[in-house]
Amino acid sequence: MPDRRSFLSLAALAAASFFPPARAQERFSHFVGSDPGNVNRMIQLAGLRDGDTVIDLGSGDGRIVFAALRAHPGVRGIGVDIDAGLVRKANEAARALGLAHRAEFLHRNAFDAELARVDVVFMWLFPELMRLLRPKILAEARAGTRVVAATWDLGAWQPDAIDDLGGFVPSVRRWVVPARIEGGWDWELPMRQRTYSFSALFEQRMQLAEGVARVDSRREVLQHLVLRGESLAFSLRMTLPGIGHASLAFTGQVRGDSIEGSVLAALPVPGDDEAVDEVRIPWRARRSPRPAYFAPTGTQLGTSSPGIPSAPFPVRVRNWNGG
């Protein structure tokens, strides 16, 4: 059976076609209590962990925050609502439930909420409001923050998980805020007694990204690129001077202006066309405002180019290097 929120959502959708966006936003942003079953679905999809801090944008009477705190004793909750009366009642309820030491409700506009230190963002707002909040979430929330919303989506930002029961039951969606990798990155990898300088460019729209990389005068497209929160993985197949055709699988964690992880390198064995050596190499990339990818290339393919140094033999040998 459809709940009250479902009927409100259908009414809001119909009204949006008759009212200008601003008027529709004002008229249909008022609080309507969420069905407890759907609230529990939101809590389940959030994947709460002890130590998480959750925030509910448009918290109303606090029921989503209270449900999160009941589900996980180690979770702390914040509610934000523009209705001072609802904020007062939610704080009173927190005291009555013995949750005031873990729950706080603030009289604040959702656009002024502090998102930098939360782990989960809950929303169940008019669809236009959610779309308007999307840039704030992507700009301010930490990479890896989970965003959980019912009924409405976030436009071009595709969800990472969906709980859809069909019919009139609202869908619940979860997004994971991606790290920002857009732009240039440089790094070095020592292989076979030589250090190779890599330069890469990433293009990004939310969690969808693609990239290209360069070593010396050679460029290739990055394959199988996956960005989820702070985690980044991709592969690169490229002919490297002095090695031949190498297959490199990168995995790492994005930490602001650096990426730290490792590379599984499959390198051809000299003199044996069938054999491959595999070695795992530490990987650390740094963000570059002027990536060497754009350095002049020249006309001699397979040689070093200006701005892309290729170190002579030998450079340095690590104790993990197998060849």
Image (cartoon, rainbow, N blue to C red):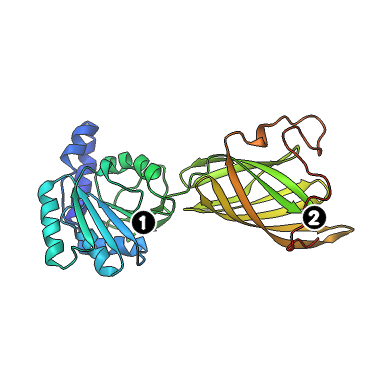
For residue 17, above or below residue 232: above
State left or right for residue 6 relative to residue 312: left
State left or right for residue 299 relative to residue 12: right
**Residue 231: image x %, image y %?**
52, 55
Looking at the figure, which quarter contains the C terminus? bottom right
**Residue 245: image x %, image y %?**
78, 51
**Is residue 134 something one can see in this rendering?**
yes
Residue 119 has which mark? 1
Q: Amino acid at mark 1?
A: Asp
Place residue 105 in its image quadrant: bottom left
Q: Nearer the viewer, residue 188 or 111?
A: 188
**Residue occupying image coordinates x 26% and y 59%:** 77
Looking at the figure, which quarter contains the N terminus? bottom left
Total number of numbered labels? 2
First in sequence: mark 2 vs mark 1 = 1
State left or right for residue 197 relative to residue 82: right
**Is residue 2 something one can see in this rendering?**
no
Q: Nearer the viewer, residue 32 or 122?
A: 122
For residue 137, above or below residue 64: above
**Residue occupying image coordinates x 30% and y 48%:** 152
User: Label 2 belongs to which residue?
Assistant: 192
Callout 1: SS: loop
For residue 200, above or below residue 233: above
**Residue 286: image x %, image y %?**
59, 45
Q: Nearer the viewer, residue 309 or 139?
A: 309
**Residue 232: image x %, image y %?**
55, 53
Marks 2 and 1, how far apart at CA? 43 Å
State left or right for residue 240 relative to residue 120: right
Place residue 309 in its image quadrant: top right
